[in-house]
Amino acid sequence: MGMARNVILENKSLTLTVGIKTLFRDKELSFPESGFVLVKGENGVGKSTLLKEIYLNAPDSQKWVWPLGKKTIGYLGHELGLYSSLSLSENLLFAASLSNDSLNPDQIFEFTKYFQLNRRLMDPIYTFSRGMKQKAAIIRALTTSPKILLLDEPYTGLDMDSTTLLTECLNQESQKKLIITVLHDVPSNLQINETISLEQKKV
């Protein structure tokens, strides 16, 4: 890896407001083409709001600039985006149908095997435990093969084994795509390339 840092997405002056509250103003942001970027800060400074802003507005807003051309964005928030009456397989194949760059069924199956859900492919999501739903949602987010993956507290509900698997997976994936993540507790083995700190705005 050379020192060159290709910028995939930037915003020279982002102001984020929720209702009448300004979370931060005129923040300059620039994201690398690949790697793992951690967003940190106290509660209420706008970490989750920043991820939603990128997901919802970066594709079309004039303020967000794509130096390398527009790329696909995947998002996993607190809502897991799964249809509880559909099977895991149906959920993943439906997600894959929404993107032109999706993984093929074999690649998707590899992820279900990796996260130890391959025996539950035909089971409806409502039969899953909280941790299994979280793993299913992570696979769903990877299925569309986005160039930018936004993850809001992806470790929620995971036991130690699954936490290790996810960390290993994110370390691998961040070598070929940009992953921007909000994390309360950071696993020690997670390879973080850059950190963005959001601070409480001084009143």
Image (spheres, grey):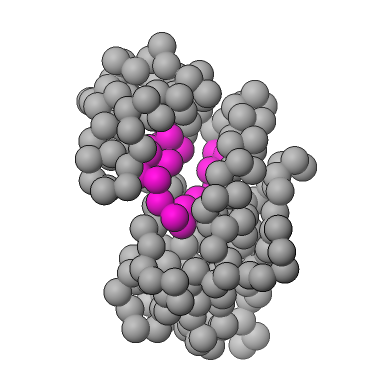
| 187 left or right, relative to 110 | right
Residue 128 location (% of width, % of height): 40, 21
Residue depicted at x 36% and y 58%: 72
User: Which residue is at the front of the view, 81 or 175?
Assistant: 175
Q: In this view, does 119 lie above or below 130?
A: above
Q: Is residue 81 visible?
A: no
Quarter occupied by residue 133: top left
Residue depicted at x 49% and y 69%: 8
- Which quadrant: the C terminus? bottom right
Residue 95 location (% of width, % of height): 28, 39
- Which quadrant: the N terminus? bottom right
Residue 178 location (% of width, % of height): 53, 57
Magenta span covers which residues? Answer: 136-156
Q: Is residue 39 visible?
A: yes
Q: Which residue lies furthest to the front in this view?
A: 2
Residue depicted at x 70% and y 44%: 190
Quarter occupied by residue 106: top left
User: Which residue is at the front of the view, 173 or 190?
Assistant: 173
Answer whether residue 157 is magenta in the image. no
Answer whether residue 154 is magenta in the image. yes
| 71 left or right, relative to 152 | left
Residue depicted at x 60% and y 49%: 175
Q: In this view, does 100 lie above or below 112?
A: below
User: Which residue is at the front of the view, 93 or 20?
Assistant: 93
